[in-house]
Image (cartoon, rainbow, N blue to C red):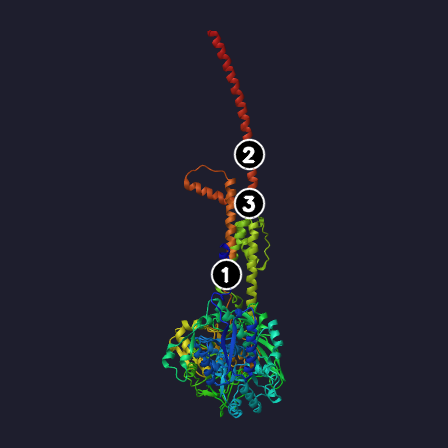
Amino acid sequence: MSIVWALLLCLLYNGYHSSGADVIKRPQTVNIGSIFTFNSVIGKVAKVAVQAAIEDVNSSPLILHGTKLKLTMHDSNSSGFLAITDALQFMEGDTVAIIGPQSSVLAHVISHVANEFKIPLLSFSATDPTLSSLQYPFFIRTTQNDLFQMAAIADVISFYDWRKVIAIYIDDDHGRNGIAALADELATRRCEISYRVPLETVSTQGDIKEVLVKVALMESRIYVVHTYTGQGLDVFAVAQSLGMTDSGSVWFATNWLSTLLDTSGPLSLEASSSVQGVVTMRMYTPDSEHKRDFISKWSNLTKKDIKSPLGLSTYGLYAYDTVWLLAHALDEFFDQGGKISFSNDSRLNELGGGSLRLDAMTVFSGGDSLLESILQVNMTGITGPIKFTEDKDIINPAYEVINVIGTGIRKIGYWSNYSGLSVVPPEALYTKPPNRSSSSQQLHSVIWPGQTTRKPRGWVFPQNGKQLRIAVTNRASFHEFVAEESGTNMFKGYCIDVFNAAMNLLPYAVPHQLVAYGDGHKNPNGTELIRLITTNVYDAAVGDIAITTTRTRMVDFTQPYIESGLVVVAPVKKSNTSTWAFLRPFTRQMWLITGISFLVVGAVVWILEHRINDDFRGPPRQQCVTILWFSFSTMFFSHRENTVSTLGRFILVIWLFVVLIINSSYTASLTSILTVEKLSSPIKGIQTLVMSDDPIGYQQGSFSRNYLINQLGINESRLKPLTTPDQYVEALKRGAENGGVAAIVDERAYAELFLASHCEFSIVGQEFTRTGWGFAFPRDSPVAVDLSTAILKLSESGDLQRIHDKWLMSSACTSQTTKFEVDKLELKSFSGLFAICGLACVAALIIYFILIMRKFIRHQPQEPDSAGGSSRSARLQTFLSFVDEKEVDLKSKSKRRYMDVVSNVDVDEDASMKGSNRSRKFMSTNKSSNTESAGESI
């Protein structure tokens, strides 16, 4: 009996641990379908690959455990209607999944059917990015998303510093959505699609020529072709006939071209010549032994059904892996207890059968579970690791960047979503931290159209297209910066030359027309010009336009090409050398503190040296002279008195260092005063003007007026507008008392140009704002960013300085070595030195008096308290006498006092010894007489 129970337990155990196949019996066959175009470039390869995969899966004992896949293949023949009917037919045959469709257009349509009947749709070639949306939950892309291909193309375009491209594409879901993804990727890299060329799905070469003729007139020479194989070759053939594939052009093709080259082998001589120098993409699949085995047997697989040689494209590899992906998902589906069952759709039953037999179509009950199993698959196929991200994309998207050369191709690098462009396979970079820096992006050299390795410029001056209306400030003065040439619509000047030089450095053409803003009699208002850009009256503004906070809120400015803050220009006069010129290096406070310091240091050294140094002793008059002589002789380091005490030497070293600094500064300043001609002005800077009530001039149309009123609070009535340099001269010469101005506040660029020919005026004080001039463009304009880069290149190359020297260098005042009066050396410049010296003196005196007090207490005996006032006075006189007493005399006196005390002690001891002997003798005599008296009484 026990044996029977044991057998039953063994049977149960084996049943529950047989991969679930015995708990819920697995079906012998599972129906799957496929929809693609058999005679297409992709379909030919996919048909062979799918059939080979079905055969390998069914013969493998490691998967499905006895269940066979039964494949039904339908040819859609590139027809959307046929694809829909094929899909509906599968719904009648208990199909659990469909491999396909081939195109993104059909995938959009059939996905709705798949959603309704819960049949997973696994496509190995529908790459439209929008198919990943939540609208199509049962669509599963088993190949790379075109979103990553467009990112790769955008990275290559950005790598070569091109900014504008022309997109040529098929006007269907595949083409439109792919180019939309390209536009998004380009925008993140500050590039753009300047023109889009949609083509009909069935286009003749005549139709293509009609649109390419327009494209040939445009400025951009960077083209991206996103079509199917047939139309793509027609595009290149027409472009070659129009001369658009010659030197200077750049052509990119999406992976349709690499697929064609891989599948059909060498192209015809005519087709091959039209794609020379084209850069195309190919989905990257890492090398592996499994992949090499499949490639080695590919020729044998194609001989069965196809007589002509058929190459293996990456779509064939993904088609093969799609079958294995589905097999792994079904295996997991059965392991989890799933079963194949279908149910009728009540909504279809209500419609009735009719000739369409809608009631025969069934819904896959396990569709949701199988879909989840598919998305959870984690396997390695011949295309590499296969696993889905949260967005239902295959992990590690990567592409090969290929250059078409001759009848073959040349690999120039790789692109991966992990680290961008590289010359090493992507899997070599997955173990390293991601690096997207510009220095890490690399590609091998490219042979461009025209058989050149030199990078094409990527643009030409267009023969048509919209021209930008660029306003130019038409000034009434300072024509060196910008001026309109009389009788023409042309402009010249420093600002114009900088603008033209920067425009020539752009990697694309910017058709533009310069338009004068202003009548030339009054200087135009810069802020008002900026407002006109915001209202689209002008597309940009060029000229002497200062970059201010208010203006940057309205437009974007380029990098400043000249620095120009606000300064004060005022009349100056020459400072002639006077009899007392030697006093000018220092201020009064500096002279006063320096003199006091000499006396203080001399007195401190005298106090520290008086008791121990004979050089600092003598009669009071002699000691006063010694203090004065010692103090001022240290100025020339000629003092003859030696310092003996440690504290005195310490003070002297510090003071000599201070004297050295003062002497050096005085000598340098006096030399400058006596050898360089100086200019002086009662106005020292903007603060002088703010504190006074004098009238102030400003350039009419400049932002300086608003700054003086709003920022500095100067009354508007004090401000006088001036236009020309002649008005500047007249107003400054008349002065504030005679109806002129005390000074002019203007931008440094104008001030320096004005002063180059008017040497009787000068900039006084410091520049009190920091601004610059730039070119203005609408907000978020890519041209502004690229022009900023161009201006930096001009600066680095020295061209910007050469343009400056051409227009703004004047020799009227350059021969004069005039210089505005330098500020005198003030006390605050040396306050640190005086503070250090003062603290050292105080510290030395404190230490000295502590030591003196100790010596005084030790050498002077304590006297009994007497009348308070007289005692303290006597004590103070004693202390002062002690301090004035020479140290050597004090020591001799102390020694004599000590000897006297010792001798007195010896005399007292002798006297006390004699007294003691007499006392003892007297006491013994008394004792003997008392004894005798006692004996007599007895």
**Marked residue nearer the N-terminal end (2 or 3):** 3
Viewer-side residue, 902 vs 117:
117
Q: Position of residue 196 (x, y in %)?
A: 49, 85
Specify the amino acid type for callout 3.
Answer: Lys
The vertical placement of 619 against 598, above or below, is above
Q: Position of residue 69 (x, y in %)?
A: 52, 74
Which residue bears the numbered disc 3? 886
Q: Give the label, 3 or 1, closer to the camera.
A: 1
User: What residue is at 53 percent from the left and 18 percent from the top?
Assistant: 921
**Marked residue nearer the N-terminal end (1 or 2):** 1
Alpha-carbon distance for marks 2 and 3?
Answer: 21 Å
Circle 1 Cα neighbour tier, 10 Å, few/some/many (<14 / 14–19 / ≥20): few
Q: Position of residue 862 (x, y in %)?
A: 48, 38
The quarter of the picture where residue 519 lies is: bottom left
Which residue bears the numbered disc 1? 11
Kindly state the secondary structure of the residue where label 1 is placed: helix
Q: Position of residue 96 (x, y in %)?
A: 47, 75
Alpha-carbon distance for marks 3 and 1?
Answer: 124 Å
Determine whether label 1 and label 2 are within 8 Å by CB.
no
User: What is the number of the mark on residue 81?
Assistant: none
Which residue bears the numbered disc 2? 900
**Does residue 3 appear left or right of residue 446 in this picture?**
left
The vertical placement of 686 against 251, above or below, is above
Specify the amino acid type for callout 1.
Answer: Leu
